[in-house]
Image (cartoon, grey):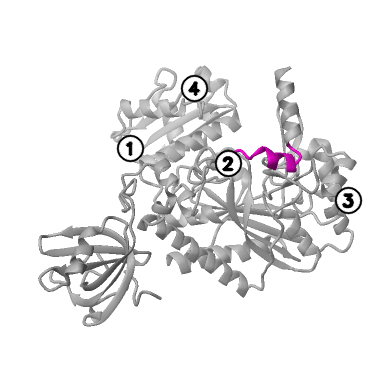
Amino acid sequence: MLRTHTCGELRIDHVGQKVTLCGWVQKNRDKGGLIFVDIRDRYGVTQLQADETNTDDQVVERLRQLGREFVVYATGNVIERASKNPQMPTGDVEVQVTDIEILNEAKVPPFLIEDDTDGGDELRMQYRYLDLRRNVVRQKLELRNQINREVRNFLDTQDFIEVETPVLIKSTPEGARDFVVPSRMNEGQFYALPQSPQTFKQLLMVSGFDRYYQIVKCFRDEDLRADRQPEFTQIDCEMSFVTREDILSTFEGLIRHLFKTVKGVDLPEVPVMEYDDAMRLYGSDKPDTRFGMEFVELNDVAQNKGFKVFDDAQLVVGICAKGIAEEYSRKKIDELTNFVKRPQIGAKGLVYVKYNKDGSFKSSVDKFYSQEDLKEWAVKMNVEPGDMLLVLSGNTNTVRKQLNELRLEMGNRLGLRDPQKFSALWVVDFPLLEQDEETGKWHAMHHPFTSPKAGQEALLENDSQLANIKANAYDMVINGVELGGGSIRIYQRPMQEKMLSLLGFTPEEAKAQFGFLMDAFEYGAPPHGGIAFGFDRICAVFGGVDSIRDFIAFPKNNSGRDVMINAPSAIDNEQLTELGLKLNLVEAEEKVTE
């Protein structure tokens, strides 16, 4: 190594030692005879110092030539700093330079490479290799590395074996859109990049690898948001000869291990909530349980009082915001009303009821409800003086989703969603199937390999019962984020054929798409189940942020582009011809022209 120590290593007990450091220039300050230079590497920052009265002239000249982000090689003696900096781990010492070499000069960076930078998102992504020099970004990747290591440590102790599965696979019609890859050797045919290794890990169970895992790249061609990227990483796992409870116990153990070793947090036992209860109490299958504000249904006390908005609704439902009745002015309530009326939420209005500390009520529906009526609401919702009720109404499924958004907004406004507080939850008993309202077609709520809940298999034969079948599936939710999900799988050919038939596959289509899996089931497939965690999402939750992007070394922007390397991009005609695509593109252009 060129260096003897890193830039974050030197302490007071190194005083008197001759050292060599390598790094990038963070700052340089010429005090007219006394020169200070901060150099940085991934481990920290150390201050270099030189007094021109007792330093070689050439060294002084080179120090004065330094600019931000120059790469340097510096040798000197560690001395105690006269003016110490308690904000720096190396702040008790500095290196008195005896020699310095400029290994590489640097252009002035397009933004400050500091924790508080002046660079916007797009600019920092364009120069991501510079952004990665910043402490706040580097620390996120170090956290990712630590979580990665602890995942492997835990699964190794549980007898899991890591097996790599193919990246070039077959496109399937279920799930999100595939990214497709043309085959040069098989002209006119395409691979797909895997959305998950689902069928391969099931085949590994057939092969007798009863505990598999893989920290694996997956790909989905879908619209992006803060918690989505076109390529992402999963902790993918599968187990044989297990029940749902075995899966929950094993992977609750993994999550608790991660919190203990990475965050130093003793996560309590993770409660289990049924999907129907999650929707009824929170309007979401991934509820944030760091705070209360559970839904209370008010149909029996709010309807048939002459208020048509409520009388015509399938559901009247509200939440209680504790202790805010006095502080919430009409202006703030109007802000909430405008919030729920935004197109992405779609409510037509908001009803509020303030329970004043003198025991009286003030509401936006005083014209329709007496004080006695509103008292009934308060009793049902367990409201105390000083609280405020927020009530929505409408179609059951729609209004629950709208109130969920309002609940989360109130949680943010009232500071109840502390990113350093963690509340975990298993959500179970999802519907196995969901029906498209327009086409009437059934879709798998998880995927077509999920088995019905034990004892409900016979309901697959009764079309009128399909909506009532529960999946033997489960999701891990922390702080309102779905971190992982899985299921006990179908492992017998007749049931898998039946499931694919319900999803609209003809026998020929089922054989063409999944025949290899169903054939494997006939050679002794064991009962099995598994789970996949969103590794990037785990990192974001542990880091206390909503976006997964900073936990990925080279992420895409919201348009799915890598602005640093300018991808995706066009390829030349020669490549298109080799892939058998050029003719197709020409024909497509001709059709558009016609």
- Tell which circle, 1 or 2, labels the residue nearer the N-terminal end: 1
Q: Earlier in the sequence, mark 1 or mark 4?
A: 1
Q: Nearer the viewer, residue 356 or 141?
A: 141
Secondary structure type for disc 3: helix
Report x, y in % for residue 234: 60, 56
Which residue appears at 28% of the width and 58% of the height?
26
Labels 1 and 3 touching (C-beta < 8 A): no
**How packed is label 1: few (under 14 Cα within 10 Å), some, or many (20 or more)?**
some
Please say if the residues under marks 4 and 2 sit with CB atoms less than 8 Å apart. Answer: no
Image quadrant where one finds the N terminus = bottom left
Q: Amino acid at mark 2?
A: Pro
Residue identified by numbered label 4: 348
Residue under label 2, please give it: 568
Q: Amino acid at mark 1?
A: Ile
- N-terminal label among 1 and 3: 1
Instruction: Identify the secondary structure beneath mark 2.
Output: loop
Residue found 10% across the figure and 60% down from its top: 32
Membership of 578 in magenta stretch: yes
**Residue type at tag 4:** Lys
Report how far apart the C-alphas of labels 1 and 4 lie in the structure.
23 Å
Compute the Cα span from label 2 to label 3: 43 Å
- Residue range in magenta is 570-581
Query: Disc 3 marks which residue?
Result: 494
In the rendering, at what x and y percent does residue 473 appear? 68, 52
Above or below — where is 230 with respect to 392? below
Q: Secondary structure at mark 4?
A: loop
* Disc 1: which residue: 324
Tell me the quarter of the image containing the C terminus. Answer: top right
